[in-house]
Image (tube, grey):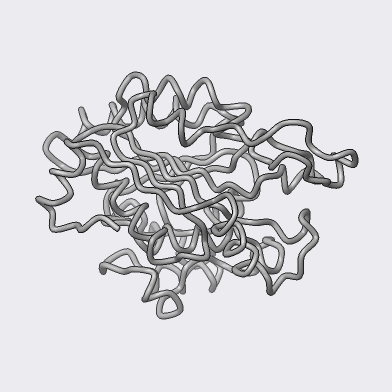
């Protein structure tokens, strides 16, 4: 995990696609970026298979633009919509089996700590609501109970988006989906509240309608996880395909959620707050 790790091997340069060469030459990996810089550097190879207006793709873009040290970060994913953009980025990336991403991330973080003593090697889990709240809930909670120094980001589109539109544990009660024609029968799993009691030292609930807050949350989550303990960001990333709203209404949909049930919240333990203040990070 270094700049060399994401430099193409010269023997393969001739067979790499022009899109990947451009990504390597014009990506954000040798300069500090933020959400304000989106559009000034190349993010992923194209064409990518995300739907028009995809909230998950937007959440990923905002998050990856905010990493404090992208060249020294490994992102752990799982099968789902998030895979498409993450696998086409120029980051160190690993796709796990569905749901065990926090276990894999825990092992990688421990290994990197031993292999690179005294150096910051960030491990960031970035997966959907199915990976965190449903199939991977036990792995997620136990990584928090153990105090693993990893950051977890849930890209909460409230649906299993790439397999036809099944309800997830994070779907709101009553939501009608392609594969939930009678509407969901129970409310969202309170993962954010569970995180507070499971050992998380820093957590934020936010939506893609607040890009600077989302970018700051992921940056701080990565920074705090380096020294203090596990962190969590729950980001609402609505899905136009399965929720049946127009593809240019993603931000509007997220803003409506902020007003009704997805209000911004930042949870900071004393240790995390002191650490962030020492870095000059002002909480929202």
Residue furthest front as drawn? 260
Q: Which of these two is toward me, 124 or 254?
A: 254
Q: Residue 58 location, x and y as percent?
A: 55, 63
Q: Residue 202 location, x and y as percent?
A: 31, 40
Residue furthest right as drawn? 181
Please indicate whether residue 71 sits to the left or right of residue 209 in the image.
left
Q: Which of these two is toward me, 16 or 184?
A: 184
Residue at position x 26%, y 67% from top?
32
Res 19 quadrant in image: bottom right
Q: Say if 203 sits above or below 68 in the image.
A: above
Q: Say if 204 sits above or below 187 in the image.
A: below
Q: Residue 221 location, x and y as percent?
A: 32, 46
Please indicate whether residue 279 sits to the left or right of residue 190 in the image.
left
Q: Residue 254 location, x and y as percent?
A: 59, 61
Q: Say if 24 sits above or below 202 in the image.
A: below
Residue at position x 45%, y 23% from top?
141
* Quadrant, the C terminus: bottom left
Residue furthest bottom as drawn? 40
**How many circles with numbers are drawn on the protein?**
0
Residue at position x 33%, y 42% from top?
267
Please indicate whether residue 45 sits to the left or right of residue 223 in the image.
right
């Amino acid at each position: 995990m270094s700049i060399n790790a994401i430099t193409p091997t010269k023997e393969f340069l001739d067979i790499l696609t022009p899109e990947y060469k451009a990504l390597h030459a014009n990506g954000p990996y040798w300069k500090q970026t933020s959400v304000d810089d989106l559009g000034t550097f190349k993010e992923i190879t194209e064409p990518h298979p995300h739907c028009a207006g995809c909230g998950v793709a937007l959440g990923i873009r905002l998050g990856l633009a905010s990493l404090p040290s992208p060249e020294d970060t490994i992102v752990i994913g799982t099968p789902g919509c998030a895979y498409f953009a993450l696998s086409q980025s120029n980051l160190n990336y690993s796709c796990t089996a569905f749901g065990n991403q926090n276990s894999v991330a825990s092992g990688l973080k421990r290994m990197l700590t031993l292999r690179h003593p005294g150096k910051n090697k960030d491990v960031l889990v970035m997966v959907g609501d199915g990976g965190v709240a449903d199939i991977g809930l036990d792995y997620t909670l136990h990584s928090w109970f153990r105090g693993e120094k990893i950051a977890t980001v849930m890209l909460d589109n409230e649906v299993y988006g790439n397999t036809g539109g099944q309800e997830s544990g994070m779907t709101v009660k009553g939501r009608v989906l392609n594969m939930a024609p009678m509407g969901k029968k129970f409310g969202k799993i309170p993962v954010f509240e569970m995180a507070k009691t499971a050992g998380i030292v820093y957590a934020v609930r936010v939506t893609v309608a607040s890009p600077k807050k989302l970018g700051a949350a992921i940056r701080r989550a990565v920074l705090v996880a380096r020294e203090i303990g596990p962190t969590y960001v729950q980001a609402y990333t609505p899905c136009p395909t399965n929720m049946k709203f127009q593809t240019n209404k993603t931000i509007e949909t997220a803003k409506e959620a902020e007003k009704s049930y997805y209000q911004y919240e930042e949870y900071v333990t004393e240790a995390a707050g002191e650490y962030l203040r020492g870095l000059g990070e002002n909480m929202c």
